[in-house]
Image (cartoon, rainbow, N blue to C red):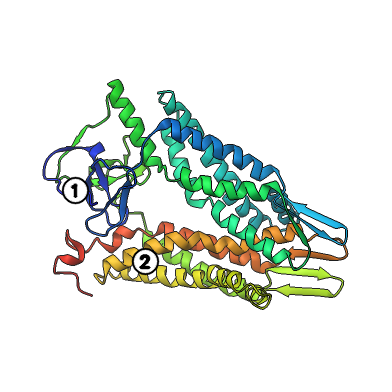
Amino acid sequence: MQAGPSLSVTVHRYDLISCHDCGKLHRRHPLAPRQKARCVRCRCVLYRGIASDANRMAALVLGAVFTFLIAQLFPIVALDVNGLRSSATLLGAIHVLWNENMQVVASIVFLCTVLLPAVELGSLLYVTLSLRAGLHPPGLHPLLRVVRAAHHWGMTEVLMIGILITVVKMTSLAQVEPQPGLFAFGALTLMLAIVTAFDPRILWQLTDEQARARGAALPAPVLAGRAPTLTCHACGLVAEDRGRHQRQRCARCGAVLHRRRPDSVARTWALLLAAAILYIPANLLPVMVTHSLFGKEDDTIISGVIYFWHSGSPALAAIIFIASIVVPVLKLAALSLLAWTAQRRSRWRPSQRTVLYRLVELVGRWSMLDVFVITLTVALVRFQTLAVITAGPGALAFCAVVVLTMLASMQFDPRLIWDHLGANGENDGRNRP
């Protein structure tokens, strides 16, 4: 369903919602579970109808926390080669990378697979248990802002696919024995898919509903329907714009408000240029180096794709090729197109460009797949003089490419696509290239 576009009367600011992608203001309507409210202009999903049951939320988050601890503390998989045995936990794999002078890659893997998911789950557990008790937890708003940031960079589902690819790859080298950590990560991936359906904005909304039920006063209750507005990108609250020369903060969560991300296009171009430069060594330099009885062998990303293709795993070869080669190139091309058209104030196909931006945001994290495969492979293949695999310089360059392109997509403000159009976007008769 579409959120109502009419704002001709004075309304409560908590009943308004602004589209993240095009900036159009809508009136919020109640939704049944599994219903979606979409923007009338760019068709972006504004919010979903979810049963805001604090008991159910707390139970799911608590289960995910225990599963997360099991996944981190127990080995993921064990290898056996002629009596030589090797196993690895995720933390152990990160430690191996750190000791091989790959501190930058180890730090990024730790952030994306351990620290940020832990912060997200811990914060959600604290908030949901407090809401279940009918309390307004101290530090609620900063914590929910942290949850939003941590969710963007947490990559448990990508790690799970990386684990499966590593297991398949190891079957040709040794006897593979699944360990508790493997099953825990599988369960954690499914549980996080459910937990992350609880957008932090839903928790903000639930907190406001509880405050209203208690009779607590909410700040700045109304907005004039045609007044200029600013939208908080953290909690979604709409505020009245007081002018360019006055620094404003969100009345609910305290985040700094701005019309558009400062220097959005310039920062996007800078990050894209750095990523494009590093993409060349990321594909030419070895990402893994194998030392064995037969000598030394360098493996690049392309050679990994060829290995899976010739070893009878064309599906895995396709996954790695798409995630590690096609996706980075398409991200660079797509973000360059978006930045160029925004800089030229183009009116060309705004709806299609907005969809392109959403796709970039959706697939951006999947390029980390190869980095996770390298991390686990390096930790598992430790058979002394028989065979040892170490990370190569290409892994560092490729990891940097992934992070830079993700930062570039975060810096680009999609509302710039629509700023030069009329109220109805491409349907207003002025939308021409």
Drawn side of residue 31 relative to residue 363, left or right: left
Q: Residue at x 32, y 38 (%)?
A: 250
Q: Position of residue 86 (x, y in %)?
A: 80, 55
According to the image, label 2 marks what residue? 356
Q: Is residue 159 above or below residue 119?
A: below
Q: Indicate the amino acid at tag 2.
A: Leu
Q: Residue at x 29, y 71 (%)?
A: 344
Q: Position of residue 264 (x, y in %)?
A: 37, 59
Drawn side of residue 56 relative to residue 388, left or right: left
- Residue 255 appears in view: no
Q: Is residue 275 above or below residue 76?
A: below
Mark carried by residue 355: none
Considering depth in this image, is 336 or 194 the residue closer to the camera?
A: 194
The quarter of the picture where residue 51 lies is top left
Considering only order in the chain, which callout, 1 or 2, is on the residue closer to the N terminus? 1
Q: Residue at x 43, y 60 (%)?
A: 361
According to the image, label 1 marks what residue? 4
Q: Position of residue 67 (x, y in %)?
A: 60, 41
Q: Residues within 10 Å of mark 1 (few under 14, many from 20)?
A: some
Q: Identify the secondary structure beneath mark 2.
A: helix
Marks 2 & 1, CB-CB < 8 Å contact: no
Q: Residue at x 61, y 64 (%)?
A: 370
Q: How many marks?
A: 2
The quarter of the picture where residue 421 lies is bottom left
